[in-house]
Amino acid sequence: MMRSEIETLQKWVDESSNIVFFGGAGVSTESGIPDFRSVDGLYHQKFEYPPETIISHSFYEKNPAYFFRFYREKMLPLGFEPNITHKKLAELEQKGKLRAVVTQNIDGLHQKAGSKTVYELHGSVLRNYCTRCRKFYPAEYVKNADGVPLCTCGGIVKPDVVLYEEGLDEQTLQNAVMAIRAADLLIVGGTSLTVYPAAGLLQYYRGSRLVLINRDETPYDSYADLVLHQSLGDVFSQL
């Protein structure tokens, strides 16, 4: 990695007072949580159905038992710890520099690291509600349930995660758009920028300091003011 790129990023961070970080699965893979699209990610593993099908709303409705079996085995990341990226972002927020984290992840690790303003575009495994009476249940309840997790009222306890065919939460989306629009530095990391509508949020950035940190190229590399094809941990450990 070019030292000058890190120095540029450090200078921009020092000069900024309204930083927004927009992150994807690559933020959490360094904590040991598998992503979806890499070579050994979920989409390349063999199941009876494609993962995109299993985690769709219609499949959940038709086959909740199989959905929850897959969800427990592959999508319920409990017992993981925040990594250097999560911790550095929380530090930047405490220093009054970082205003918001916008994340596509559902693992709650940003909050575990100490971040307070986190907009979870795809929801969180830590929030689970009865679809009938709206009673709240922790992730452990879903993990330890036998088969389909049921509420005391008999309703299904559904994780508050956005499945395929479901829309994003309007308020969360609006908050994310407002934060990105007001940012003086937008750092995008650990995302292929191919999942919409999340990837489309970059178009709301009005500033001139768009930083992309991702191991692989993204469709937005040519729009960025600084591109680092590195792991987030490598970059953030040097800031």
Image (cartoon, grey):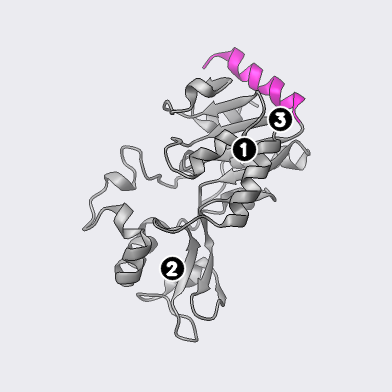
The residue where tag 2 is placed is 143
Residue 68 left/right relative to 128:
left
- Under tag 2, what secondary structure? helix
C-alpha separation, residue under disc 1 versus residue under disc 3: 11 Å
User: Residue 34 appears at what percent x and percent y?
Assistant: 40, 46
Q: Is residue 4 above or below residue 197?
A: above
At label 3, counting other C-alpha atoms closer than 10 Å, the crowd grade (few under 14, some 14-19, many 20 or more) is: many
First in sequence: mark 1 or mark 3?
Answer: 1
Write down the region rendered in magenta. Answer: 1-16
The residue where tag 1 is placed is 21
The residue where tag 3 is placed is 184
C-alpha separation, residue under disc 1 versus residue under disc 2: 30 Å
- Under tag 3, what secondary structure? loop
Question: Residue 54 versus residue 11: which sits nearer the camera?
Answer: 54
- CB atoms at circles 1 and 2 under 8 Å apart? no
Name the quadrant of the C terminus: top right
Q: Residue at x 65, y 17 (%)?
A: 7
**Count the marks: how many?**
3
Q: Residue at x 23, y 51 (%)?
A: 46
Residue 123 left/right relative to 18:
left
C-alpha separation, residue under disc 2 versus residue under disc 3: 41 Å
Q: Is residue 228 visible?
A: no
User: Residue 197 appears at what percent x and percent y?
Assistant: 48, 45
Answer whether residue 17 is magenta in the image. no
Give the dominant element type of the magenta stretch: helix, strand or loop.
helix
Q: Is residue 141 above or below residue 122?
A: below
